[in-house]
Image (tube, coloured by chain):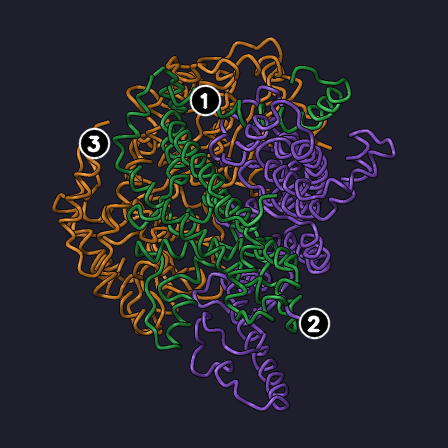
Chain colours: A purple, B green, C orange
Amino acid sequence: MKSDVIPVTTSGPPEPNAPAGPPGDPRRTAVTPPQSRRAGARARRRWKQWLLVLLLVLLSVPFVFPTWWMATSSLKPMSEILRRVPTIWPQDPSLDAYGQVFALQPFAQQYWNSLYIAALVTIGTMLVAAMAGYAFARIRFPGANALFVLVLVGLLVPSEVTIVPLFRIVNSLGLIDTHWPLIVIPMLGSPAVLAVFIMRQFFLALPVELEEAGRIDGLGRWGTFWRIALPLSRSALGAVAIFTFLKSWNLYLEPIVYLSSKENFTLPQALTQYVDAYGGPMWNVQLAATTLTVLPVLAVFLVAQKQFVQGLAHSGLKG
Amino acid sequence: MATVSAAVRRDWLVGYAMVAPVVLGALAFVILPLGMVVWYSLHDWNVLAGTFTFAGADNYQRLAADPGLTDALLASLWFSIGLVVLNIALALLLAVLLNQRLPGTTTFRTFFFSPVVVSLVAWTIVWSFLLQADGGINGFLAVLGIDGPNWLRHPTTAMVSVIVVQVFKNVGLNMILFLAALQGVPEELQEAARLDGAGAWRRFRSITLPMISPTVLLVSIITIVGSLEVFAQIDVLTGGGPGSSTTVLVYYLYQQAFQFNDFGYASALAVLLFVIVLALTLLQWQSRKRWVFHEV
Amino acid sequence: MSAQHNPRRAAGVAAALGAALALTSCGGGTDAPVGEPDAPSEPVDLRMTVWTADETQLGLFQDIADDYVAENPELVSSVTFETIPFEDYTTALTTQLAGGNAPDLAWIFESNAPEFVSSGALVDLRPLLESTEGYELDDIVPSSLELWEEGEGLYAYPFSNSPFAMFVNTEQLSAAGQPDPADLVESGDWTYDAARDISAATAEDTGKQGLVVRDFDYQAWENLATVWSGWGAAPWSEDGTQCTLAEPEMVEAMTWIHDAAFQDGAMPGPGTTADFFAGDAAMTITQISRASSLDGSFDWDVVPLPAGPAGQQNVIGQAGIGVFAAGEHPDVAADFLAHFTSPENAEQLAAYFPPPRESLLNAETLAAANPSLSEEQLQAVVVEGVEDAVTKPAHKNFAKLSQTVRAELDALWTADADVEAVLTDTCSAIGPLLEE
């Protein structure tokens, strides 16, 4: 095993300035002959590993249980879901709720709405943020700082604050009950600011020398950006993509305010529509629909996480 | 800058063109709405009655005299401090644990990340079940011989509950950012320090932490911004209570606007909220030179 | 995608632009009653916001609307029913109003009723309904209209009048050896004290909960109106200017509730929710329409609300339909409302919503709508429940009052609370709000 980045698993003589471990701490019993010391260190390390895994298992419970509850409750009848002591596994599992999900609403259409809106917003944001981030980082045009601060303001405005004026603007453009406000505003408005910020920081960290070659090859500023800088920023773009996609995918207040016909609804909004005749939520159907919206995203993450984390690591995504 | 060559001018033009979409977007979808909010805040606007009359600084004078606002500001303060500290501490802990090449790391990563993609409403409802007086959490504590509190019904524990539920929901994303940063810490540095005899904690504090401090800054900014959007959690878990202990500023603003139909006053609150966040962010940004290791 | 072609978009870009950019648009405020509509230059599209997402209900609405469009092609080209989720209904509706995009008609919660009625946001429907042939406004139970009236004006039609009743888990009661509430109703012994004792004993026996006032949860205190009405109590005076929370009858009622929860073990305490329909409670007070949530997993019965010291008092929950003055065609919208709630159509709507019309309030009409209830139950609970019923507390400043009272009452929900002191404090806290 090569050197661990993380110090916790390493063994060695106690350091005077380091806080003394508890009495049972293996670091305290360091006086052993060299040979068995190595073997003992390995055993200790294995012990520690298992302790850490146990810690991880315990820590996982509050993260996993709600998701588990959501998925299994979608197989329960309503009365069992609302029982005060939750059942870990449905007493009489049934897939009825999943049938209802599609029977009660144009769920496939709504799924598609969410998917294509999130995809467009993600691609658009990546492009817009990469351009702006690059220009703010690299090109010293007059007023760059002022414009950057102007853009950053968007980071500080919660959506509840501007929803009414934004609604008026969208309404005056005649775009109520269309997907335009859900695509254009996130791409250019406050939700995009974090992306611009991340991209700017990335390009600031990127050594200028990498672009010199392009300059020599006679590429202009745009060519350098498009052919050299952008491909190098794949990892930072990955971070932007996942943020942006999740944000759009989970958008709740805005669709409720902007959209009114069922065929136009997005998923978070559609979920609230599974109610009985008197406004009471049909929990099993809502949870079934929720499960259908969550599992694909989780699956993608499970597969892509390694590239994602490594991409971020190599991106020099440094504040 | 007396003379600027044509090539440089052309470069500037490319720069303007590249930032044009976000700058125009910011003007249309951030600055203009903010301006409208400021304009509304100078009016007495009852949406139902359809009255919109100029009120000058009345709404701002109301701010000064509103006891509910003081409570909301205090609640926001506690909420934000608790959220940021707990979120960063837990995200760091998880990232460090997951950076150990332990068995099952991939699975654990997915576990910790999963709440990020779960719908907020479903997430909050499960927790409202678990946090009941005789809910799952107190059931668990009873096994350990602890008599758990009535979480959502006491001011302190209610605030703690709202914070913890919010932290669990979003900490996965921050964990990923820290994990990425940790993997970017050069191993040679650690190795050198180890040869110098630096202990585990010491190396973490003197090498790892400074190396990832830019990420700490980024994560704290993301978390603070995220703490502004806590409406659904508070609404489902506590409804702002007990008393007004969990009525944070955003929730208070929401109540004024959408429950009390007092858009003028709500707009004044929005302006106040904006000024506070702006000041805090500037402060944070200014101080970064002191604690962020390398400004790049 | 749908983003590209939206029928309503082309229709009013210019008009909307003008309206929305004029920030000072005085949207509502017209108290002028609407009369017979003049034919607009071209047929209009009407829009009505509702909180139901139930396909069969929406289908029925659409059928009724299609008839109207067919009869009045010169007035209306279409009627759209827009579902806004229950939880976010008021937020979204308010945003639409604030954004200058008011719907033509809207369902309105009873708790918002005085606020909407007194604000001038709605048009007066009375002249039109009185003059519409065959509408028979006299047929409507007068007490059901009170909430929606101001002066001579009538600002909404209460399409839903759902009585509150006591649902009983008879299986749990008989297992615990408790008397059957239906017998107590018969003998005239069905009182709140009886309900409390039965609940406490049953909860003791089952290890579950006793009596649940549904949706109260120690937050939505206005739901306790079903209980304190039996004491003849109310939170404020009829005209809404005086706090009456500290009056003796309210103190007595609240003490009863407090002790039922903290001493007798008859009601779940704060932080404990128990769902009657999941079999977690012995009885629950809720609207009769909830019978649809019963899935047959236990035996149950439904009986009228028990009597308190001041006698038995029926309580109903209402919902109204109003026409927005700020809508584009209030006169056409009001004419459609007259059609939508005419005697014939009201009978159809009665399949889901207990109507306010005397002629329809009989067990046969309602039986079709409520298959899970027997005719006797309907007669006792619905037909007689709507007559002389009171509604839950309402006030034109209700949102703020509700919030303030909730925060104050939190002090009441501890075992050693001083009920009278808390209620007196609450009165001083809401005094200024009542006078506003």
Please report, as a chain letter, where disc 2 is located: A
Disc 3 residue type?
A: Pro
1 vs 3, front mark: 3
Residue name at image x 20 percent, y 60 percent: C259
Examine the rendered structure and indicate whether residue A171 appears above or below residue B247.
Answer: above
Examine the rendered structure and indicate whether residue C237 appears above or below residue C215.
Answer: above
Near-viewer residue (A89 or A158): A158
Disc 1 residue type?
A: Phe
User: CB atoms at circles 1 and 2 under 8 Å apart?
Assistant: no
Residue name at image x 28 percent, y 48 percent: B243
Label 3 – label 2 distance at C-alpha? 72 Å
> Which dot marks residue C432?
3
Residue name at image x 30 percent, y 42 percent: B71
Q: Please tell me if label 1 and label 2 are on a single chain.
A: no
| Coordinates of residue C101 in the picture (x, y in percent) | 52, 23
Left or right: residue A24 compared with residue C8: left
Q: If the image is split into quadrants, where does the C terminus of chain C sit?
A: top left
> Which dot marks residue C324?
1
Label 1 – label 3 distance at C-alpha? 29 Å
Disc 2 residue type?
A: Lys
